[in-house]
Image (cartoon, rainbow, N blue to C red):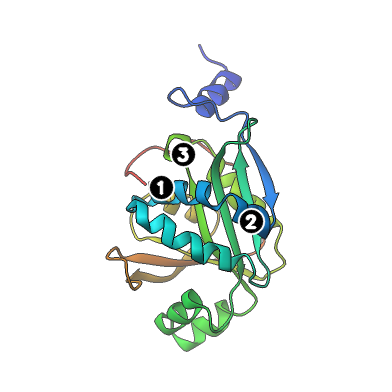
Amino acid sequence: MTTSRDDERQSAMGSGVDARDVHIRDWTGPELSARVNDAMAIYVLAMNYPGYAGSQRSVTTRRHTTNRGFSCRAALRADGTLVGFGYGYTTVSGQWWHDLVRKALSPSVAADWMSDAFELSEIHVLPTYQARGIGHRILVSLAAGVPHRSMLLSTPDADTRAFRLYRALGFQDLARNYLFPGDARPFAVLGARLPLISQPWTRPRDRAPR
């Protein structure tokens, strides 16, 4: 018979990967910029994008670090290895994502959700470290540290671990099956009021790859 402590240990280790030494750290913009290549390597693996997409995105990410309200969390092993990250900023008119999403929403929904909102631009975990609560910890830490009324994000519109995590934390549909320029996959635009629902992480059942 296994004890609850045994179960927690097995969930943390997964298939040979021990995530118990992973800690979440607040990163400044310059700190993310200094490790942007590491972050983008995780980005392309987690999103299944071609390698060149990481190089292109790194330019955008560096620019994002200067946006008003920028906030970032890094998931680091004890040896400094980056295994996950998430960041965002205050969403305002004139930003690429903001302006596209505003057009996709009805005027009343846009007015309700897109003012005083934090845009979660990126949140990714190295695939070998997924399903171990790291994404949950990054997201909860980010949400707890921003003063906004709402948090907004877009995610591939499919039954993924990430989508189920967002649902568990109170994110609701603002738009579904939305196509962003340059990506053939449909996305869902989700929003949640802050503070997020207090929901402890539980190991998910894999029903679809992320």
Packing grade of label 3 (10 A; few <14, some 14-19, many >=20) is many
The kind of secondary structure element at disc 3 is loop
The residue beneath circle 2 is: 72
Report which quarter residue 105 is drawn in.
bottom left
**Residue, far left:** 184
Can you tell which mark lies on residue 46?
Answer: 1
Q: Label 1 to label 3, Cα distance in Å?
A: 9 Å
Label 2 Cα crowd, 10 Å radius (few <14 / some 14-19 / many 20+): many
Tell me if residue 97 comes above or below residue 43 in the rendering: below
- Identity, as a three-letter code, of the amino acid under mark 2: Cys
Label 2 element class: strand
The kind of residue tagged 3 is: Gln
Image coordinates of residue 44 in percent, x first then y, are 40, 50
Tell me the amino acid under the disc marked 1: Ala
- Mark toward the viewer: 1 or 3: 1
Q: Which residue is mark 3?
A: 130
Q: Mark 1: which secondary structure?
A: helix
> Measuring 39% from the left and 46% from the top, which residue is drawn there?
45
Q: Position of residue 111 (x, y in %)?
A: 55, 85
The structure residue drawn at horizontal position 42% and vertical position 39%, both measured from the top left corner, is: 127
Residue 181 versus residue 137 in the image, above or below = below
User: Marks 1 and 3: CB-CB under 8 Å?
Assistant: yes
